[in-house]
């Protein structure tokens, strides 16, 4: 009756073939995914913001990171002056500007 059931023989424990290379491939794939999902978009945003800061000029209508709207009256090396109301000017860092509005936006308020 032993011919219907095969005997289970213990095999010697051997490490899985290719285990080391598979780990390096997995880490590489993970790094590529992180690059395209996090690092690349962040560096693109930083590059676009730097280009925006460099292109600021007198008369531009801007939005600050705090949400204030105003018109640039003076541009310095690191700071600029923004007129937020008649006779009210604020001195801000250039990096505080988040967006440049189309000309004439402030008159429509």
Image: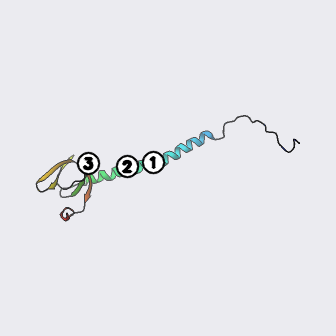
Mark linked to residue 95: 3
In this rendering, position of residue 51 left or right of residue 82? right
Please state which of residues 99 and 4 is positioned toward the viewer in this rendering: 4
Q: CA distance from mark 1 to mark 2?
A: 10 Å
- The extreme right residue here reads 1
Secondary element at image label 2: helix
Q: Position of residue 32 (x, y in %)?
A: 49, 48
Q: Earlier in the sequence, mark 3 or mark 2?
A: 2
Question: Marks 3/2: CA distance?
Answer: 16 Å
Residue at 34 percent of width and 49 percent of height: 46
User: Could you tell me if the residues under marks 1 and 2 are in contact, i.e. CB atoms within 8 Å?
Assistant: no
**Label 3 Cα crowd, 10 Å radius (few <14 / some 14-19 / many 20+):** some
In the image: residue 97, left or right of residue 89: right
Q: Secondary structure at mark 3?
A: helix
The label shown at residue 35 is: 1
Q: Position of residue 82 (x, y in %)?
A: 17, 53
Front one among 1 and 37: 1
The residue identified by callout 2 is 43
The reply to whether residue 77 is in sight is no
Instruction: Please determine whether, in this image, residue 41 is positioned above or below residue 24.
Output: below
Q: Is residue 83 among what the camera can see?
A: yes
In the displayed orientation, state which residue is furthest to the front: 1
């Amino acid at each position: 009756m032993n011919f219907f059931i095969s005997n289970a023989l213990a095999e010697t424990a051997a490490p899985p073939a290719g285990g080391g290379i598979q780990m390096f491939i997995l880490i590489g794939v993970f790094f590529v995914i992180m690059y395209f999902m996090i690092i690349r978009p962040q560096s693109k945003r930083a590059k676009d913001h730097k280009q925006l800061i460099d292109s600021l000029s007198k008369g531009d209508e801007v939005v600050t990171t705090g949400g204030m709207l105003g018109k640039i009256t003076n541009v310095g090396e690191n700071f600029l002056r923004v007129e937020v109301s008649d006779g009210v000017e604020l001195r801000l860092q250039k990096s505080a500007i988040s967006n440049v509005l189309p000309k004439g936006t402030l008159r429509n308020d």
